[in-house]
Image (spheres, helix red, strand yellow):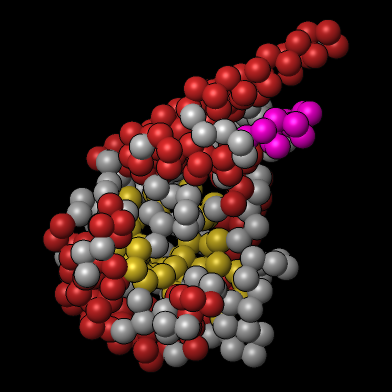
Amino acid sequence: MKIGDITLKNPVVLAPMAGVCNPAFRLIAKEFGAGLVCAEMVSDKGILYENERSLKMLYVDEREKPLSLQIFGGERESLVAAAKYVDKHTNADIIDINMGCPVPKITKCDAGAKWLLDPDKIYEMVAATVDAVQKPVTVKMRVGWDEDHIYAVKNAQAVERAGGAAVAVHGRTRVQMYEGTANWDIIKEVKQNVSIPVIGNGDISTPQEAKERLDKYGVDGVMIGRAALGNPWMLYRTVQYLETGEILPEPNAREKMNICMLHMDRLIELKGEDVAVREMRKHAAWYLKGLPKTGSVRNEINQMTTRDNMNKLLFNYVDQVEEIQQKIS
């Protein structure tokens, strides 16, 4: 798959998840084989006002590339200016415009999913951005605002007409948020009505589901979000399955905690120990998902304030699991 002049080595894409897709996690996703990783969305106003936190979110490690940086905003002028900043001052490969975020504080500013109600505004916004930058411009959107306003095909056609290089479509409406099921029939309709690459997103939780979506719905790529939380093996296993047809085994407890600690150490480098350990509490809980007897360790995670204590807690748990498994075998 090519997005503009950027070639991806496979069609597996890490979704841009707010509060998750910082360089620490993105680099792990890349090492686990993702063809493209997407950064969490950054406010156009935050970039223009040179807000320290916003500018830090634009950092890209060379090892993550190809990488897509996502921006959001409700006004053409500020969004275009932010895109120009990203184009000139970052080493990202792709600039993505968020037209899918369903959160009220974003849609109230006419940003995110609010764009889905107006294909003409989408055309103007994307065309102005494409004209202003050198990097390929893409859009991440949902199928529609609600059941009565599903303009996915019109919106994707507007993106293509405006010079957008690809579109990622989440199969839910804004009203659905993250509930219910994703409608892949609408994603297929989008694919049939545009010639730019279409990346499908929503409810992909196994390598087999990823292959089925590619085959059945004809999309060019699959975007994996929640299934990769605490589980970058989902990305690796999907790439392997698409390339070889082989389903690799799930990781064991020790393998999972080794990567969890690598993730934490990278986050500490980025944000310092205090902030990183607090942020890693939710990630550690995700890494534990699917493992046996995690009740007490999950409760204790939320009390952790230092790297060493978190490390001790997680590997004590691993030792206990391995001891039980040795007794059984």
Is residue 241 something one can see in this rendering? Answer: no
- Residue range corresponding to the magenta coloring: 291-301
Please report the residue visible at 36 percent of the width from the left and 37 percent of the height from the top: 272
Give percent across and percent down for residue 318: 66, 19
- Residue furthest out toward the left: 88
* In the displayed structure image, the side of residue 84 where residue 154 appears, left or right: right
Quick one: quadrant of the C terminus? top right
* Image quarter of residue 217: bottom right
Q: Nearer the viewer, residue 240 or 30?
A: 30
Please report the residue visible at 55 percent of the width from the left and 27 percent of the height from the top: 310
Q: Nearer the viewer, residue 320 or 181?
A: 320
Please report the residue visible at 26 percent of the width from the left and 63 percent of the height from the top: 51
* In the displayed structure image, the side of residue 54 where residue 108 appears, left or right: right
Is residue 318 something one can see in this rendering? Answer: yes
Quick one: quadrant of the N terminus? bottom left
Give percent across and percent down for residue 76: 28, 84
Is 270 a magenta residue? no
The correct choice, above or below, for 258 with respect to 200 in the image is above
Give percent across and percent down for residue 245: 60, 35
The correct choice, above or below, for 100 with respect to 203 in the image is below
- Residue furthest out toward the right: 328
Is 299 a magenta residue? yes
The correct choice, above or below, for 76 with respect to 250 in the image is below
